[in-house]
Image: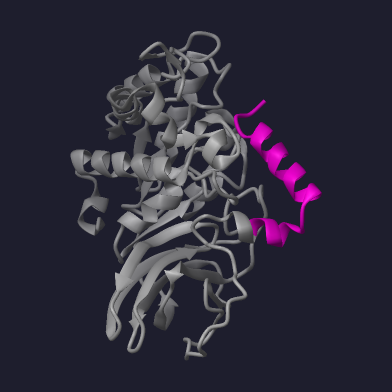
């Protein structure tokens, strides 16, 4: 059974017992915020936008990459505004503006259908581009959307720890990474919950779909391990090698990312399972490192980086990186809270800098 099957089942049970799916998602999305009925002084909003908290905007565009510019702030009111797009992708963390202050921001945004996970797990979303401005008092005075001209594309191939999770508190690091990348480069997150290296490679809407779109110079970040519970060392290395070779055949740049650790301790030491040694004894990170060396592929050792972070915090404090019943309503030692996903995205960016990948010049 995949790492995500149990939490998917819990979410479906909640949805069946409570209000409709739309209401569930509206209330659950930590980054998106829930709609309020509080009266607000009418104010002019950009075309395509409505509401007050959150402010929601919709643009009927076809799948592709778009340059989006926004003006955050108001000539009359102070504000606190964050910007999220599509399936809970963070573009702008909460930003404060004083009355009379307006700040300009630009982003390159990938629009797909389905807008989140490529297999449609968790919902397919709405065709076109959806933007949500959230915060204690979101303020937006202008939005422009136009097709992007040949951006650098960074594709993400991975599982539920990477993907655009449809419902909070679950958050993949790939949902946070766009907020760390400036205009001219775009994150196209094709990660999908429950996938192993083999299943991702075999599904036509996953790895083959990435390869079909890759252009010369595009990056493809490849992270698998959590669902390779019974994958042999030979098969795992073969899957990774195939991915690397297919990306290179298109002129793309593959980047291997070892899987981050689980929150599983024996005393103050992470267990072998936490360190991604699978149920048949295969040290998956070690196998990925070996493939990276043999094929001369850039490697981000997220296993080592996350292990250092988690162990430095210790068993108790590091729990906040993951999901806790006391805070999130569920205990999950594999998947991340928004805070944890933010930390993991930061470690990925650290690795991007260390490897001096082409994305470096676009990092915020």
Q: Residue furthest right?
A: 16
- Which stretch is magenta? 1-25
At x 31% / y 52%, what residue is drawn?
217
Q: Pinpoint residue 231: horizontal percent, then vertical percent.
A: 55, 18
Q: Is residue 345 left or right of residue 212?
A: left
**Quarter of the image containing the C terminus?**
bottom left
**Towards the viewer: 343 or 282:** 343
Q: Residue at x 56, y 49 (%)?
A: 168
Q: Is residue 360 above or below residue 95?
A: above
- Above or below, 305 against 21 in this view is above
| Residue 205: percent from left, percent from top | 61, 48
Residue 279 drawn at (x, y percent): 55, 12
Q: Nearer the viewer, residue 197 or 278?
A: 278
Quadrant location, the N terminus: top right
Residue 160 visible in the current orientation = no
Residue beneath the point at 73% across and 45% down: 14
Dividing the picture into quadrants, the one containing residue 352 is top left
Q: Main secondary structure of the magenta part?
A: helix
| Res. 6 image quadrant | top right
Is residue 37 something one can see in this rendering? Answer: yes
**Residue 23 among those drawn in magenta:** yes
Q: Against 173, is 290 above or below?
A: above
Q: How many marks?
A: 0
Does residue 189 appear left or right of residue 354 in this picture? right
Instruction: Tell me the residue at 31%/57% (across/down).
Output: 181
Give the residue at the far top of this rendering: 281
Which coloring applies here?
A: one colour
Side of 313 where 91 appears, left or right: right
Q: Position of residue 357 (x, y in %)?
A: 24, 46
Does residue 12 lie above or below 93 as drawn?
above
**Magenta span includes 289:** no
């Amino acid at each position: 059974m995949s790492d995500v099957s149990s939490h998917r089942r819990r979410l479906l049970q909640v949805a069946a017992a409570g209000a409709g799916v739309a209401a569930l998602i509206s209330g659950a999305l930590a980054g998106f915020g829930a709609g309020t009925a509080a009266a607000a002084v009418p104010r002019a909003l950009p075309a395509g936008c409505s509401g007050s908290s959150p402010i929601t905007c919709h643009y009927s565009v076809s799948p592709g990459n778009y340059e989006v510019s926004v003006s955050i702030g108001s000539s009359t009111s102070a504000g606190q505004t964050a910007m999220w797009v599509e399936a809970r992708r963070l573009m702008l963390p909460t930003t404060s503006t004083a009355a009379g202050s307006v700040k300009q921001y630009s982003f390159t945004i990938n629009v797909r259908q389905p807008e989140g996970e490529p297999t449609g797990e968790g919902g397919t979303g709405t065709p076109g581009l959806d933007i949500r401005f959230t915060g204690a008092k979101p303020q937006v005075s202008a939005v422009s959307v136009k097709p992007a001209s040949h951006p650098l594309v960074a594709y993400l191939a991975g599982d539920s720890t990477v993907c655009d999770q449809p419902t909070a508190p679950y958050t993949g690091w790939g949902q946070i990474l766009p907020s760390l990348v400036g205009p001219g480069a775009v994150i196209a997150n094709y990660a999908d919950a429950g996938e192993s290296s083999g299943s991702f490679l075999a599904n036509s809407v996953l790895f083959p779909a990435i390869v079909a779109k890759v252009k010369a110079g595009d990056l493809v970040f490849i992270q698998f391990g959590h669902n390779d519970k019974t994958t042999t060392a030979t098969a795992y290395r073969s899957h990774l090698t195939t991915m690397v070779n297919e990306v290179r055949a298109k002129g793309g740049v593959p980047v291997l990312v070892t899987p981050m650790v689980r929150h599983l301790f024996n005393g103050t030491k992470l267990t072998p399972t936490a360190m991604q040694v699978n149920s048949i004894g295969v040290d998956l990170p070690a196998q990925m490192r070996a493939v990276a060396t043999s094929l001369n592929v850039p490697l981000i050792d997220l296993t080592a980086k996350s292990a250092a972070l988690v162990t430095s915090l210790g068993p108790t404090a590091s729990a906040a990186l993951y999901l806790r019943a006391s805070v999130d309503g569920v205990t999950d030692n594999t998947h991340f809270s928004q805070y944890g996903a933010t930390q993991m995205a930061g470690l990925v960016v650290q690795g991007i800098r260390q490897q001096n990948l082409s994305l470096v010049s676009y990092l915020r």
